[in-house]
Amino acid sequence: MSRMRAVVQHEFGGPEVLRLEDVEVPEPLPTEVQVRVGYAGVNPVDAKTREGASVAKAMGGFPITVGWDVAGTVSKVGVGVTRFAVGDRVYGMPRFPRACGAYAEYVTAPSRQLVAVPDNLGLAEAAAVPLPATTAYQIVTDVAAVTAGRTVLILGAAGSVGRFAVQIAKSRGARVVGTDGAGKLDDLAAIGADLALDYRTQDFADHVGEVDVAIDFVGGGDIKRAISVTRPGGLVVSVPSGDKDALRAEAAASGVRLTGLIVEPDRTALEYVSDHIAAGAITVPAPRVRDLTDVVAVHRELARGMVKTVLRVAG
């Protein structure tokens, strides 16, 4: 059997449980493709799962390999695959919340959970897209059903998911108000935010009036103020973990619906984002690139809120 490098853990714990090992290369089943991974995106869910939280129960028994965001080149196609051929550049977040094993030189995935990488997007940038962009699409389009003329408030709008949420909401004709740190406000304006506010010095409740949809990527006390500025009959989407029952009760008392979201692989979502990337309507900033061998350091930095990072696997 062919062998490959993969980041493997044999127990839950801190970043030090991540080890680079030689393992068997997975072979594609019918309707699957094998992908030579160029870059693997790093997301907060990776660290939570590594610790034994989040979707850890769906990973199966040890050893496990975390990571879902994959960008690479099709290296084999299984029987029945019609979407791709060997050599095609693809990306996606296959199998979530079950194990994908993105921190490895090869992965296999259902072909319909992958999408062609736009010609104007490098593989490093592509690896930073799938999970954040799919999450943003499902919130804005499926959960909130944002349409033209709606006002959308996004807390943490310059984060990896928030940035896509701003651009997707704008692509659907919404007015978007985003909050983040002062150093990120120019970027929010550049990607289409109609109003960008510094959460440290500007109270959004003093600026937004009434909103149709509020999306919280931050957590903490701001979510309650977001409920207070959402119109009766409006929607608040709370993404961070926490006591959703208490928040739902508070929202209901104001005539507002509150919900969360767990993302799932979604070819429709990623194709929408890809089309807008190809047209220049959605931009993807260059992520920080680190080698697969640096995975322990990257996970340590992830706990401190590092910038968006991808792991170079094949380069």
Image (cartoon, rainbow, N blue to C red):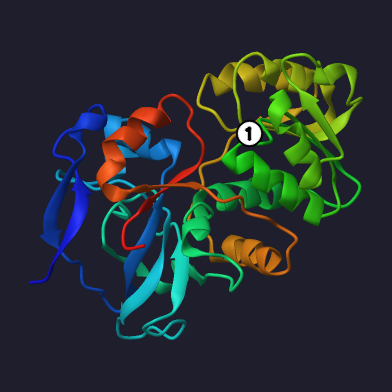
Q: Residue at x 29, y 49 (%)?
A: 292
Residue 32 appears anywhere in the view: no
For image coordinates 39% across by 58% down, the residue present is 39
The answer to whether residue 70 is above or below residue 287 is below
Q: Nearer the viewer, residue 291 or 279?
A: 291
Q: Residue at x 65, y 39 (%)?
A: 162
Q: Is residue 71 visible?
A: yes
Percent position of residue 115, x then y: 51, 70
Q: Name the quarter where the N terminus is drawn.
A: bottom left
Where on the picture, by quarter, is residue 271? bottom right
Residue at x-position 53% and y-position 19%:
243
**Which residue is the site of mark 1?**
259
295 or 142, which lies in front? Answer: 295
305 or 238, which is in the foreground?
305
Q: Quadrant of residue 214?
A: top right
Up/down of 240 relative to 310, above or below: above
206 sits to left or right of 294: right
In the image: residue 237, left or right of residue 49 = right
Residue 77 placed where, x, y %? 32, 81
- From what the image shows, is residue 138 above or below residue 195? below
